[in-house]
Each structure stands twice: as C-alpha cells, then as structure tokens.
Amino acid sequence: MHDDQTVRSRSTEGMVDYNANSSAQQSIVAKHAETIRHLVQKIGPVRPEFRIADYGCGPGISTINVALPAIETYRELDDGGPIAVCHADQPGNDWNALFTLVAGPEGYLDGRTGIRPGAAVGSFYDRMVSDQSVNLATCFAASHWLSHAVQLDSPRTVWFADLRGEARQKMATLARNDWVQFLRLREQEMRPGGYLLVSTLGSVPDPTEANGVAASGRGIYRAIQIVAQSMADEGFLDKSILDRFVFAFWFQTEEEARNAIEMDPVLSNSFDIEQLAVRPALGNADDVFGALIDDPAAYARQYTGYMRAFADSTLRTQLFAPSAKNADEAEALAREFYRRFETLYCEHPGKYKFELWELTVILRKITK
C-alpha cells in the first residue's frame, strides 16, 4: 500500500449552502438543548466570566442554538455576570454569515447585554483558546472529521466503513490518535469543573456488515461510490484517483470512543465520563429524510443538497479537480456528478437512505 498523503485543503472548508441543508445537524443540536441547560446549572455562577466554546461551529444556526440555551440558563443563575461565546472553526468557515446571525433576530445578542461573542480560527486539532478558560465546551457533528485529508488504496469504496486490511488499520489508527489529540487539547483549555459535550455520528455493531459495524450514513456514501464509479468507468473521472480517494472521517463505536479515553493516562486522570453512548437519533433515525419518500423528486433534491453541504469541497479538491484539465472541466464534472446522484435517489427512494446513530460523550474536567 502506498503511504497516505496529506491534501492541503481542509476537508470541511467551503461547504455549500450548509445552513439550508444541515437539518440533520440542527436536529442533533436541538435534541441537546436540555442537556446544555442541565450542564450550565451544574457548573453554576463563575468569574471572571462564563465562557462557552463551540468547536467546529460551522456558519449557521446550529451554533446559535448551542449558545442560546446556555445563555438563557446562565442568566437565571447570574443575571449580571459576563458571558463569552467563542465560535471555533477553520479559516474557510463563513464567518460573515455567522456573525450576521449572532446579531440578528435569531441570534443571542438581540435584547441581551453582557455577552461577548468571538471567534477562534484554526483547527481543533491545535490549541484554539487559552489554558483553563472554558466552562462549557461543545462540539456537534464535527469531531468525526480527521485532522487531515488522506489518500489510501481504497478501490471500490470512498469511506472508512468498507475499507479492508492495511488501509482500514491505518485509518483506524489515525482516527484514534485524532480523538485522543482532540480531547487532550480540550483538557488543557477547560476549567476544572467544566463540561465537554460531544455529539457526532457513530457506529453500532452489525454482524451483517463486512467489518462488523454499521456506520451512520452508510447508504449515502455507497451512493456516492456508485455514482463516482460509473463516471470513472465511462472515462469522466480518473480511475487511479478515485481508487485512492476516501472521505477523511471515522464514526466511532461506543467501545472505540470509551477505550481511547480510559487507556490514555492524561485523559483518564483528567476527565470523569458522565455519559458515553451510541444510540439512534431522535426523529427519522432510519432515514433522515424519510418524511419525503412519497415524493421521489423532493426526496432526491433534499439528499443532494444535504450531500453537497458537507461533501462538495472534498469532492471538488480531491476528485473532480485532479481528474480535470482545467477549472471549467472540473465544474462540468461536478454538475454531472450531482445530476447522476439526484437521479439515483429519485429512481430508488429509500435504497440509499441515511441512517443516523448518534455518539454522545459528556466529560467533566476533574477538580484537583
């Protein structure tokens, strides 16, 4: 197997129409509103300020909906105490759109005082804020992305769950190391007694699957593979590039997430695990857009928009552009890919459904 290669572009940069097509992510955040309120109550009033940090915040309403229940609950505990909200994400995030929302009618500044919004720009696999400065840390639908894009020998699959042999082991090792790194950095940034809430896509045991696990979204990633393979077979995409393309994420099982914490000497001595589980998401866990299945055209459009929201930049930088002679040709490849993808979902509604199992982790920073 060839050595994996780092691709310069971050996998999550340049997401397309994310706010309009991130209903699944927004539903995960909404589900945890009461959890956020409960954690704020457990933390209680603090000085010099109560600081929230949302890692991998994205450009839209999801991060607003993380901050709102925390702010509202803290105001009930301390009606005059300063509050800081740190939105943390990569340079490619749409920061203008985000802070327009923060200050708008849906934002948390409207009608409230004593709140200091801010941004930390960079990767959450590096330090993002100062030592022991965060009371409530959150990360929604983001920690499954790995620290860098990789290229592996991965013919006939574009995602981790169907990898075999050495390629799977190499990616599993990177995923575990990244999870530990992510948590170690948050441990440094959090105040004693603070809480970290991580909610992201997970995997569950399934003996019918090749590697013994069923991972969230298995249908949509296999649909991406089918469309990309058809284009490679017809000469539109470079087959050698497709055979080494794999999305840079890993959806952990409960055992994987827990074992990495308990076996690490820093994490096991710094955090109490208050909750760690993988469960079906609330709502349409069996098919996130199942409510539209009786309208195949609408069903297909929704899936295409959702896929573009998280996958467009990855597909363009790692698959379309390397297969094209110029920017116009790369754009034509993208159009053809999305046309075929939408047609596939329209012709086979329900066959490539996105099942959603949610990994939830709540850690408390130990007071020493």
Image (cartoon, rainbow, N blue to C red):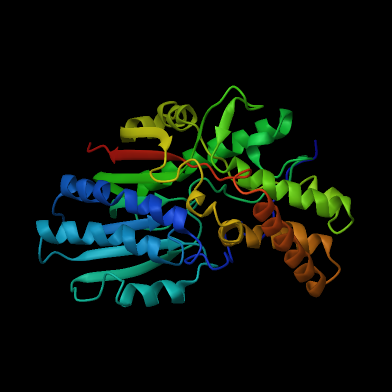
Point out the residue furthest to the right here.
Answer: 235
Q: Is residue 22 above or below residue 173?
A: below
How many discs mark residues in the rendered view? Answer: 0
Task: Give the residue drawn at x 38%, y 58%.
Answer: 129
Image height check: is 244 above or below 271?
A: below
The image quadrant that residue 175 belongs to is top right
Residue 274, can we see it?
yes
Of 284 and 14, which appears nearest the observer?
A: 284
Q: Determine the residue located farthest toward the front in the rendered image.
A: 294
Q: Position of residue 25 (x, y in %)?
A: 44, 54
Task: Give the image quarter of residue 197.
Answer: top left
Image spot of residue 331 (x, y percent): 75, 70
Q: Is residue 76 above or below residue 362?
A: below
Q: Identify which residue is drawn at 36% across, 53% down.
A: 29
* Residue 219 picture location, percent across and down: 62, 43
Q: Is 272 situated left or right of 317 in this image?
A: left
Q: Quadrant of the N terminus?
A: top right
Task: Name the one closer to the observer, 24 or 256.
Answer: 24
One can see residue 50 in this view: no
Q: Which residue, as the protein is rendered here, is positioned at the far top?
A: 207
Quarter of the image that includes the C terminus: top left
Q: How far across and how far down the image is residue 335, in percent?
A: 73, 67
Horizontal side of 156 relative to 126 (left or right) equals: right
Please name whichever residue, 353 or 148, is drawn nearer the observer in this view of the structure.
353
Q: Residue at x 32, y 60 (%)?
A: 65
